[in-house]
Amino acid sequence: MIKMPRKRYLISIACFAALMISLHACMTFRMSEKEIDKHFKAKNIVVKQDVVKTGKRTQHFIATGKENSPTVVFVHGSPGSLSAFIDFLSDTLLLSKAYLITVDRPGFGYSNFGKAEPSLQGQAALLKPLLELRKQQKPIILVGHSLGGPVIARMAMDYPELVDGLIIVAGSIDPELEPNERWFRVPLSTPFFSWLMPLSFKASNDEILEAKKELGQMLPLWKNIKCPVIVLQGLEDNLVPPGNADFAKRMITNAPVQIVLKDKVNHFIPWTHPEMIQQAILQMLVQLETNGVARQ
């Protein structure tokens, strides 16, 4: 009677460990260099795969389009990788208007995979060199989905001279609307579970664990945003409450803000309603050109 429960316990642990180990291979949320090349070769599009380095950190990105064009940088959520926006880099209408870049955020894809940077200020600093590569091809528009939303907002707060427009897509930006998940995220951050978890999940857990605090630290900085902002939000988003859009309207007081709320739309706008993002980019490009923010 004593041996059976112990045996079942050991079997359960072994099965759980085997499951986690198998997930390491299939839950990376990233495409290899060969897969990326194959994806674009099938579409007859030439892309550049490159990195920018800050200290010991490496930020991997891919880019395509006309070099002497306005710049659009896509920043993914958590977990994720640059592949979240890969189809936008083959959008012929966008390619005719802008130079398109999608980047692996710190800890994801091929940007020090598994090693998160929980600080939003730190993430903004690591992505800054990417913007500096394009500072002679303004305007520079940032598109951020989910946790990518507060990342691009922080970039506009800290480096206003490098950011000319923001498109926040289902962005988790209001600290008061962040769910209290510490009861399970703290245990997941312990060495045992961190070792078992797929690296993409580990990086995601590490940064989401600190998200509420990080967003709170940004509260006095929203007034620093001086560029136009478009917020896209689905009204059926069960991961990021629509109240985040109201927060943006309330907190961004020194720049024009347009809120686009959509019925029957969930959190996954880049995949379910890419046309919303496409139209927002095209609108922003026209708006910036009208306002005199052109290529330098």
Image (cartoon, rainbow, N blue to C red):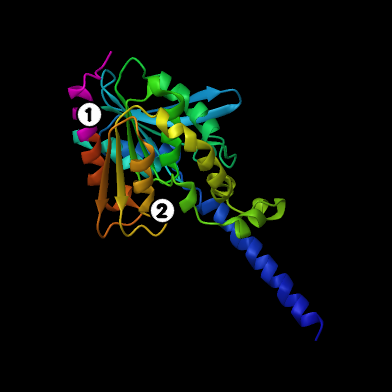
Quadrant for the C terminus, please.
top left
Q: Residue 226, image x and y in percent?
A: 35, 27
**Magenta stretch contains residue 148:** no
The numbered mark, 1 or 2, whose residue comes first in the sequence reads 2
Amino acid tagged 1: Leu
Quadrant for the N terminus, please.
bottom right
Residue at the right extreme of this rendering = 2
* Badge 2 element: loop
Q: Nearer the viewer, mark 1 or mark 2?
A: 2
In this view, the residue in front, 163 or 271, is: 163
Q: Which mark is residue 240?
A: 2
**Camera sees residue 145:** yes
Taking the image as shown, residue 4 lies to the left or right of residue 293, namely right
Q: Which mark is residue 254?
A: none
Taking the image as shown, residue 107 lies to the left or right of residue 96, namely right
Q: Which residues are magenta?
A: 282-296
Q: Are marks 1 and 2 in contact (CB under 8 Å)?
A: no
Amino acid tagged 2: Val
For residue 97, above or below residue 280: above
Q: Residue 229, image x and y in percent?
A: 31, 35
The picture quadrant where one finds residue 155 is top left
* Badge 1 element: helix
The residue sitting at 47% across, 28% down in the picture is 127
**Could you classify mark 1 by the number of other residues whose Cα lies within 10 Å: few (under 14), some (14-19), or many (20 or more)?**
many
Taking the image as shown, residue 95 lies to the left or right of residue 75, namely left
Q: Residue 35, image x and y in percent?
A: 40, 41
For residue 287, above or below residue 198: above
Instruction: Give the residue pinned by disc 1.
Output: 285
Q: Residue 85, image x and y in percent?
A: 35, 41
**Camera sees residue 96:** no
